[in-house]
Amino acid sequence: MNMQDELQKIAGEIRDFIAADTFPASISPEYLKDAVTDYPLRGGKRLRPALVLWSCGLLGGDIAKAFPAAAAVEIYHNWTLVHDDIIDDDDYRRGQPTTHCNLGKYAAAVLPGAGREFGRNFAILAGDIQQGWAANTLLKSEEYGVSPAVVLAMSRRLHEQLNCELISGEALDVEFAARDIASVSVAEVEKMLYLKTGALLRFCVEAGASIALNDSSYSDPRLLKLAEFAAQAGVAFQLRDDWLGIFGDAEKLGKPIGADLTERKPTVMLLKAFELLSPSGADELRNLLGSSITPEIIRRARYLLSESGAADYASGRAAELSAQARENLESFPDNCYRKLLSDLLEYLTARSV
Amino acid sequence: MNMQDELQKIAGEIRDFIAADTFPASISPEYLKDAVTDYPLRGGKRLRPALVLWSCGLLGGDIAKAFPAAAAVEIYHNWTLVHDDIIDDDDYRRGQPTTHCNLGKYAAAVLPGAGREFGRNFAILAGDIQQGWAANTLLKSEEYGVSPAVVLAMSRRLHEQLNCELISGEALDVEFAARDIASVSVAEVEKMLYLKTGALLRFCVEAGASIALNDSSYSDPRLLKLAEFAAQAGVAFQLRDDWLGIFGDAEKLGKPIGADLTERKPTVMLLKAFELLSPSGADELRNLLGSSITPEIIRRARYLLSESGAADYASGRAAELSAQARENLESFPDNCYRKLLSDLLEYLTARSV
């Protein structure tokens, strides 16, 4: 099976599943309902649902039972995006206006007394409903033949672990950007990357595994090994993402290079460079932060990050985590789902786009 | 049993239950964890937990089993307050600074790069974690002897019905204030009052009833009757609240009279007055809206609302709903819990404070 073909098939199935759900039907006003369904139906690669389904398949489970969980993680991912986009004050998501921008424009056109915060406020509410929608979709697993004990265990995990971890990750990401960069450590950032990205990937594979194994204790060694795989893949993906943000190709990526420098984002690579550079080199790098990006700034930043060894450090750490993830995956008997997960790992951690 | 004594006892028990919960332990950074536990531990009358426990007791259930559900509705109520306080830009809640104000002050003191939105953004995240905390606490009912089928049914209800209804109610409340007041109808406002307040009270009694009756279908006639009771009590409470906001005693209420006029809030009473007043009376009332409150404005508003019959209409509608709620309650066999619920209804709908 070709991974991209399978991903595309899953994307269609998940979209249909979400579109057919009557959950949003009773939401009013109408434009709030539209805001709730917008991101979940906007598309994206649906990597997280694929992780749920393929983990279930890897362990010999019936992937049809894992469909609600697969749709749930996608809706869950999307509510976090709606709130992140408010927090980061972003205008675009997947090439279209963000939820708070859409709602703000609607209000400006139609509601004479709406203040400037209206779009943000309604987007808070849209994300709040989506969080409930995600939890509800997971509970529907019971209708698809998952035992009540596993449904309850997955739901507990969603709230107790994923929710606390992922939101803590988002909070730390915002906090680091507001702190003096010299006070942030490489270890703190790597932990944040796990929380913000790895925790959800981990939840996905654990859900698939617990369904396949009918394991409500979350203690089967196979489930634990898959959890490690996902956490490692998540951090490796983020390290690669940060590297591409400086050394990637703007045209291939479809976004400008160097935004992390303008935002003074304390990435692993940047913090490592401050550790490794001479005082004068560190001063020069520090002076490149916070300004609008020019080709000369990119050239000097690339030079300092490469010469210091920081770029190699970040790439090397990503490669190390990716290799560990691969080792964990290869401990499972080979089947078509192991091949798909292996291709997905490659795609996440060795991509140039 | 004296209702106020019982309420006080429950308040202490719920506080202890929430304080002992390890759910928030893994949240970082530390000040986000503090924000998550702040409102749930700040107190309040804990009317909603009492509704869960007393409804369970009314139907002969073991109220010890209903404790997680009682704590869950309190945490649930509090996350909605955290987000409402952001949306309404309120500075105080129960006499102390709101969550977003506290977080904003913390950031201003400690984080050099935190922008003015920091407090609001972190309060969004605090409420997001609290929503998960509430759902998780409800799932813990299983550990207290509630059947998995009822736990799953209550949780579905939490997301599918309560979440959509309550958040739609908050959204409509915000929307109405932004619309031309002439375009808002009495029926729309009463529907919003049910959604914003009645829906959660209804969830409370349904949870208590489903635990007592071990009814995962939510179809027992006793459960349905209690649901009506709670929805009616919720709307009657809100109508009374709006009446007190104009005709109440500022000293007894502990808040200024007339804020609804300044905010041009389309209450049932105000909309009814516009229906009933002569064109010149309606013009005068319209001109009183939106300005800072003076004793003269209050005097004229009271006069117009009384003379038009709008004040009596709102009081009468509250009394009617309250009587219907009482009738529903009195269809149950008498026991100490029926007495407590009856006293609570009186307290909610006939209070002067």
Image (cartoon, coloured by chain):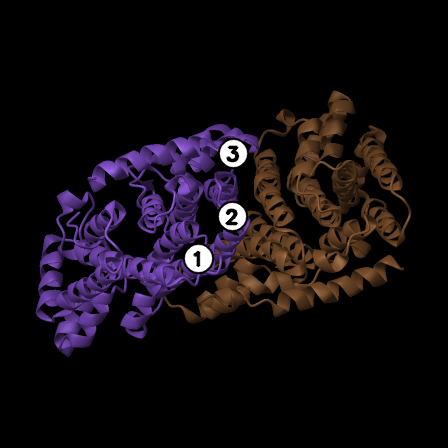
Chain colours: A brown, B purple
| Residue type beneath disc 1 | Leu
- Find the distance from the CA under tag 3 to the CA under tag 1: 23 Å
Q: Residues within 10 Å of mark 3 (few under 14, many from 20)?
A: some
Q: Which amino acid does label 3 sit on?
A: Pro
Label 2 or label 1, whichever comes before in sequence order: 2
Q: Position of residue B229 (x, y in %)?
A: 29, 59
Query: What residue is shown with label 2?
Result: B147
Task: Rate crowding at label 2 as few (under 14), some (14 to 19) or many (20 or more) other CA atoms within 10 Å.
Answer: some
The residue at the point 20 percent across, 76 percent down is B275
Image spot of residue B219 (x, y percent): 43, 63
In this rendering, which labeled residue sits more in front, label 3 or label 2? Answer: 2
Say which residue appears at 47% left-offset and 65% top-offset.
Answer: A27
Q: Where is residue B71 in the image (x, y as percent from the top left)?
A: 41, 41
To which residue does mark 1 refer? Answer: B162
Whether B81 is drawn above or below A281: the answer is: below
Chain at numbered mark 2: B
